[in-house]
Image: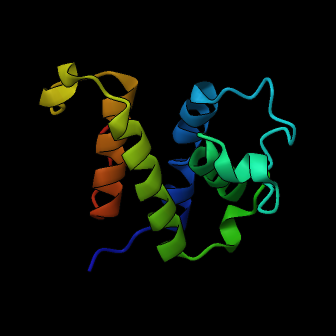
Amino acid sequence: MANISKTDLIQLFEFPRKRILQSMEVTHCPHAVFYNHSDEQCITCHQGEECLWMNHNDELVSMEDKSIDDLKQQLLVAVDFVDSSLTPHHLSRRNCQCDNCVWLRKVQQTLQGELPKE
């Protein structure tokens, strides 16, 4: 089993935070992207999952207090988000050097315990 550094995992959150926030329509959010479990508007909002993810993984959240397993799980959710936003052009990701594909490879290498290649 590979040793995965918590610090390495935490550093990987910067990119998906930016991507998720860029994709969200927050102009009319009555809670300023703070998910409210008891508000019907939040419960039915099409951005609920992104908002929940941001609330659990924002820069203001103490990521150091999370377990490695929790960090890995949250990264996998971010991987799904980034992966789902890719166009068919990205089918050959091994050769693609866009920010999305580079980050996805870095996460994969980190989760496998390899040193990401810069």
- Is residue 66 shown above or below 48? below
Residue 49 image point, x, y percent: 57, 50
Describe residue 4's horizontal placement relative to residue 65 as left or right. Answer: left
Name the residue: 30% across, 32% down: 101
- Is residue 58 shown above or below 98? below
- Is residue 19 shown above or below 13? above
**Quadrant occupied by the C terminus:** top left
Describe residue 46's horizontal placement relative to residue 101 as left or right. Answer: right
The one nearer the camera, 18 or 87, is 87
Name the residue: 64% across, 32% down: 21
Q: What's the colour scheme?
A: rainbow
- Is residue 38 shown above or below 43? below
Residue sitting farthest toward the bottom: 1
Name the residue: 45% across, 55% down: 77
Is residue 19 among what the camera can see? yes
Is residue 59 among what the camera can see? no
Q: How many marks can you see? A: 0
Residue 88 image point, x, y percent: 19, 23
**Quadrant occupied by the N terminus:** bottom left
Residue 16 image point, x, y percent: 53, 40
Residue 109 image point, x, y percent: 28, 53
Name the residue: 28% across, 42% down: 105
